[in-house]
């Protein structure tokens, strides 16, 4: 297992290097100068602009700026935001709990709904429940997130008035973050059931939108994996022994069928953490995705470089954990390592 982890880490290094190069170069291809944006309409003298560029290191050649960025990143220094003058790591740490809370809730309902739907489609194979569920999952997987989010906002927020349109909490509740998860912090800060309901109301729609694609993917994978397992010899043996349908499916088959599903769930978590840009922007959710979009508009180079690199590290860590978990769940793979 130790050698496997070492190999995974070594394989991740070229990935992180490629991400750092892409993140560094792409933002500089966008028209606009962060110094001119900082100066604004009032303008400044050419000498002042040159001084500001020198202070930000933007007067250096690109290769030297990149070498400085990587060298500082290896020491844990991702630089400071051009506009807020705060360390990039601090700004990321302030916003990441919001993204993590949203992603975990989206993944939770995706698992709770996706697995039962996949099981139902498998045991009703080639009958109307199977056709309906798989057609619905295909629609959910193909649906544009921004369109789906707007539809839910117009219906539940604008027409019915059941949920807020944006943000994490109403202005009436002043929540000082402790864990960063507002569903927990409202109890720690003594806001009680009223605060919890308000936080949950703000969370429902963005979590529903963000979890639409994962629930479709999990349902389809569960169906496919369970159908494959039901064709195994040990399932036929269980049927020959006279075991009930419930025992065959939910005791013997499903536990083995969920092994590849666990892998998909783990990979989906990494996707949700890094792919919530549209959802966070649409619902004004103060997470990492919206932070990066704002940074693109502001040409905040250090934030984009550091933020994208941190997200890449998170994906690598999550994928490595999923690989280790998959090997632990699958005895055949464990045997190959021994």
Image (cartoon, grey):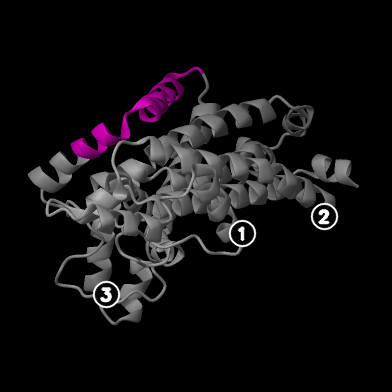
Quarter location, residue 197: bottom left
Which label sits on residue 98? none
Can you identify the residue that label 1 sits on? 74
Of labels 2 and 3, earlier in sequence is 2
Assign the magenta stretch its main secondary structure: helix
SS under mark 3? loop
Is residue 334 covered in magenta? no
Residue 239 x %, y %: 72, 30
Q: Which residues are magenta?
A: 126-151
For disc 2, the marked residue is: 2
Say if 110 sits above or below 219 in the image: below
Residue that mark 3 sits on: 175
Residue 233, how many percent across, how many down?
A: 78, 27
Q: Earlier in the sequence, mark 2 or mark 1?
A: 2
Secondary structure at badge 2 equals: helix
User: At x 77% / y 34%, what residue is drawn?
Assistant: 241
The residue positioned 42% from the left and 67% from the top of the image is: 90
User: Quick one: 17 or 153, which is closer to the camera?
Assistant: 17
Mark 3 surroundings: few (<14), some (14-19) or many (≥20) residues within 10 A: many
Question: Looking at the image, which residue sits at the far front?
Answer: 47
As measured in the structure, the alpha-carbon distance from the residue carrying label 2 to the one carrying label 3 is: 43 Å
- Which sits earlier in the primary sequence, circle 3 or circle 1? 1
């Amino acid at each position: 297992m130790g050698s496997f982890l070492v190999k995974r880490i070594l394989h991740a290094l070229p990935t992180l290097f490629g991400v750092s190069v892409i993140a560094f170069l792409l933002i500089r291809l966008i028209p606009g100068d962060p110094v001119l944006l900082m100066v604004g309409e009032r303008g400044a003298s050419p000498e002042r602009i040159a001084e500001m560029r020198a202070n930000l290191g933007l007067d250096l050649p690109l290769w030297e700026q990149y070498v400085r960025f990587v060298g500082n990143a290896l020491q844990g220094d991702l630089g400071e935001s051009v506009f807020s003058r705060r360390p990039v790591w601090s700004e990321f740490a302030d916003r990441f709990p919001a993204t993590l809370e949203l992603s975990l809730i989206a993944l939770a309902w995706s698992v709770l709904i996706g697995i039962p739907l996949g099981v139902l489609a498998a045991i009703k194979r080639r009958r109307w429940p199977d056709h309906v569920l798989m057609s619905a999952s295909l629609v959910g997987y193909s649906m544009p997130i921004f369109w789906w989010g707007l539809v839910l906002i117009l219906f539940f927020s604008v027409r019915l008035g059941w949920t807020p349109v944006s943000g994490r909490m109403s202005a009436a509740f002043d929540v000082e973050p402790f864990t960063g998860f507002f569903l927990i912090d409202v109890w720690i800060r003594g806001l009680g059931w009223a605060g919890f309901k308000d936080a949950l109301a703000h969370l429902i729609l963005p979590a529903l939108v963000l979890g639409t694609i994962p629930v479709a993917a999990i349902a389809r994978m569960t169906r496919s994996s369970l159908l494959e397992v039901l064709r195994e010899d040990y399932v036929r043996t269980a049927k020959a022994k006279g075991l009930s349908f419930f025992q065959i499916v939910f005791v013997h088959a499903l536990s083995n069928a969920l092994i590849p599903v666990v892998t998909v769930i783990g990979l989906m978590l990494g996707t949700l953490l890094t792919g919530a840009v549209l959802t966070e922007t649409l619902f004004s959710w103060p997470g990492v995705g919206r932070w990066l979009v704002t940074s693109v508009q502001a040409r905040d180079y250090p934030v984009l470089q550091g933020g994208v690199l941190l997200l890449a590290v998170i994906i690598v860590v999550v994928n490595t954990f999923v690989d280790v978990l998959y090997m632990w769940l699958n005895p055949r793979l464990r045997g190959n390592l021994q």
